[in-house]
């Protein structure tokens, strides 16, 4: 299964506005994407399009997460989402 | 014409049409099953459609909002169709629960989980409950909870308003606030005065008025009249004409014979302070520093605090700014300071008392204040809330001295402080009466409760007597230490005259009330104010105290106050 590693760049972590922007983007990519903290088992990964799941993940700035997806367009979807996580969304 | 008497809490006379705040959504009964003939598939589809509809509605509202409000609405819209919430509910529907009950339970468990995570997540727990109520309303086909949206301005009628409702209250859409519950010190009253909206609380029966009913609201007299006649229409027109005269304050509070009563503003931060300065405030009589701490799960650094304080000081160079140290607890809990499980928070560890259980926070706040003062030109005074004894006052004064703060003072909110004002004022430089809490404690009446509205007014002769005793304590102490008032009482022009007559030196209020208070104060001499104070003290009840004083101040009727 394609997967990518990303480091959270937003100052407030994956909370509040950055979480909303990311959840919305993850819901729009057309494939199901999961997110987990690095080192956590894949079967405990959470739905990346769920803002509530992202909030319970509690990823702070500098934390490393793993994104996974399967199916057509998975690689492109993951690349675009990694880019989003590695942007400081609080600054925009 | 049907008349509903209530308690007037913010002046103004207007005519408008009623929009009822929808009743809170009731909990679907535990164990409620799918209706006969409805399959789990149907119910899940209905649930998804409702969640999508709520999402779209919130998203559309976000498009018209700005700043923090927009961000909150966008996040809340996403929660409405969140897979965690909806899948949780779908599982319960598959087991035979009704869609309403299923989303209710799923919302509870998600909210509880966020609550247990603490901090920022815990604050979002209530957003999940709001979304849940909206989805249930959609499934039931009833109006969504919250302030109704409307393209034309209306009179908002509610059982009572919560602080959260104010975030979505658009002052350009709301003509007046009317509640069936709530008291004179309730959030509704405070919001109305800060927005300059006429308001009446504790008007029993108004929540039964149908939407679209035309009503006359008299926010000073305290009544609502359905289907107003021509006399009332003329009264509303006359108010519209005088209201513009009450918008300007010359910048000097004085009686007719030149006794100066500086009129100050109550503020929560830099923006408030700038607005108050523009409205002519002669300084700040109450800077509520907890607004810099709310929405925080940890203590702000000394530097962050100093910057927030400086933004207020900078709005009043060369003028007095009275800062109240952190007043957490009771209706203003802070996760890093207060214990939310106290059985009786109004009588609990709040205000100055949090220094007993969490020492250090107050020392660092005083350090930040001293730092901000050094970088600004304001004359900074600092007072502690919820002081009960002279011993506490002495300890606070020594903490201030250690931090390099020159003018320490106390809030007089606990009746014991009013009764021992002489001993307390030997320890500190000034006192400021917080009439909202002083009334609640003197009358043993929770300020948020509608049924206790008649007890909970600063017109109570017992409360006025405590004000008088505090002033007498200052005189007995002998060094002319000022006693001010910084509660909502100071914003009532008739009461402001009485307080002046009782010997109060300064009045601090929401900046919108400055012009009205100044206009009434300058029509009486100090001797007349003293007579009115005596009259109020001699009244057998709050209602009579208010009526007797108002009768002697015909200017109130002329100005529609």
Image (tube, rainbow, N blue to C red):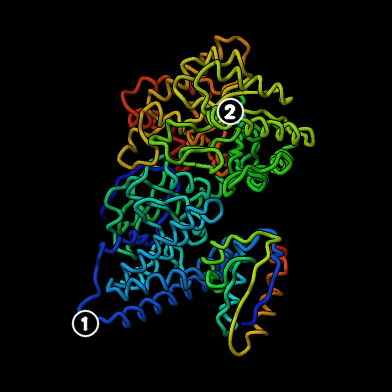
Residue under numbered circle 2: B384
Between residue B444 and residue A45, name the one nearer to us: A45
Horizontal and vertical percent for residue B411? 54, 26
Between residue B113 and residue B263, name the one nearer to us: B113
Residue at left offset 33%, top offset 59%: B23
Q: Is residue B522 visible?
A: no
In this rendering, the count of numbered labels is 2
Q: Is residue B475 visible?
A: yes
Q: Quick check: B468 left or right of B383?
A: left
Residue under numbered circle 1: B37
Horizontal and vertical percent for residue A90? 69, 63
Residue at left offset 39%, top offset 26%: B442
Horizontal and vertical percent for residue B206? 30, 53
Horizontal and vertical percent for residue B471? 52, 17
Q: Earlier in the sequence, mark 1 or mark 2?
A: 1
For residue B46, which quarter of the picture?
Answer: bottom left
Image quadrant holding the C terminus of chain B, namely top left
């Amino acid at each position: 299964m394609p997967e990518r590693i990303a480091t959270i760049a937003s100052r407030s972590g994956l909370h509040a506005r950055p979480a909303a922007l990311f959840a919305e983007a993850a819901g729009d990519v057309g494939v199901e994407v999961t997110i987990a903290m690095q080192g956590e088992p894949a079967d405990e990964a959470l739905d990346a399009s769920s803002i509530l799941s992202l909030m319970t993940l509690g990823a702070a700035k500098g934390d490393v997460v793993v994104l996974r997806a399967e199916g057509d367009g998975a690689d492109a979807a993951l690349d675009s989402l990694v880019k989003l996580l590695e942007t400081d969304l609080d600054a925009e | 014409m049907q008349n509903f008497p209530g308690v007037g809490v913010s002046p103004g006379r207007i005519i408008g049409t009623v929009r009822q705040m929808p009743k809170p959504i009731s909990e679907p009964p535990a164990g409620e099953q799918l209706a006969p003939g409805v399959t789990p598939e149907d119910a899940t589809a209905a649930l998804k459609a409702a969640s999508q509809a709520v999402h779209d509605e919130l998203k559309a509202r976000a498009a018209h909002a700005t700043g923090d409000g927009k961000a909150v609405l966008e996040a809340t819209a996403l929660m409405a169709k969140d897979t965690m919430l909806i899948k949780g509910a779908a599982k319960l529907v598959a087991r035979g629960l009704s869609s309403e009950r299923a989303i209710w339970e799923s919302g509870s468990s998600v909210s509880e989980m966020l609550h247990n995570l603490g901090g920022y997540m815990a604050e979002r727990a209530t957003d999940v409950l709001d979304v849940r109520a909206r989805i249930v309303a959609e499934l039931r086909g009833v109006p969504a909870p919250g302030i109704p949206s409307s393209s034309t301005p209306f009179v908002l009628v509610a059982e009572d308003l919560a602080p959260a409702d104010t975030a979505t209250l658009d002052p350009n859409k709301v003509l007046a606030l009317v509640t069936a519950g709530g008291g004179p010190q309730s959030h509704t009253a405070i919001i109305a005065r800060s927005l300059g909206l006429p308001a009446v609380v504790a008007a029993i029966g108004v929540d039964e008025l149908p939407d679209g009913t035309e009503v006359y609201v008299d926010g000073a007299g305290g009544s609502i009249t359905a289907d107003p006649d021509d006399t009332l229409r003329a009264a509303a027109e006359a108010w519209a004409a005088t209201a513009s005269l009450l918008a300007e304050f010359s910048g000097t509070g004085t009686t007719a014979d030149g006794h100066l009563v500086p009129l100050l503003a109550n503020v929560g931060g830099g923006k408030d302070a700038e607005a108050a300065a523009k409205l002519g405030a002669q300084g700040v009589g109450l800077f509520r520093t907890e607004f810099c701490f709310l929405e925080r799960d940890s203590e702000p650094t000394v530097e962050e605090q100093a910057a927030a304080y400086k933004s207020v000081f900078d709005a009043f160079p060369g003028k007095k700014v009275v800062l109240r140290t952190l007043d957490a607890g009771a209706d203003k809990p802070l996760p890093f300071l207060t214990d939310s499980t106290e059985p009786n928070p109004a009588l609990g560890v709040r205000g100055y008392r949090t220094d007993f259980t969490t020492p250090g926070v107050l020392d660092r706040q005083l350090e930040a204040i001293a730092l901000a003062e050094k970088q600004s030109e304001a004359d900074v005074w600092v007072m502690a809330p919820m002081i009960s004894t002279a011993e506490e006052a002495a300890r606070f004064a020594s903490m201030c001295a250690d931090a390099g703060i020159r003018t320490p003072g106390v809030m007089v909110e606990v009746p014991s402080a009013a009764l021992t004002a002489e001993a307390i004022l030997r320890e500190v430089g000034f006192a400021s009466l917080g009439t909202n809490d002083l009334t609640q404690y003197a009358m043993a009446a929770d300020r948020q409760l509608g049924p206790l509205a008649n007890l909970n007014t600063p017109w109570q002769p017992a409360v006025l007597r405590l004000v008088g005793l505090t002033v007498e304590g200052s005189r007995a102490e002998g060094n002319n230490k000022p006693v001010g008032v910084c509660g909502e009482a100071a914003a009532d022009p008739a009461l402001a005259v009485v307080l002046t007559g009782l010997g109060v030196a300064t009045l601090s209020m929401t900046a919108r009330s400055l012009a009205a208070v100044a206009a009434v104060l300058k029509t009486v001499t100090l001797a007349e104010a003293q007579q009115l104070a005596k009259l109020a003290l001699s009244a057998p009840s709050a209602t009579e105290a208010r009526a007797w004083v108002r009768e002697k101040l015909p200017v109130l009727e002329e100005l529609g106050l």
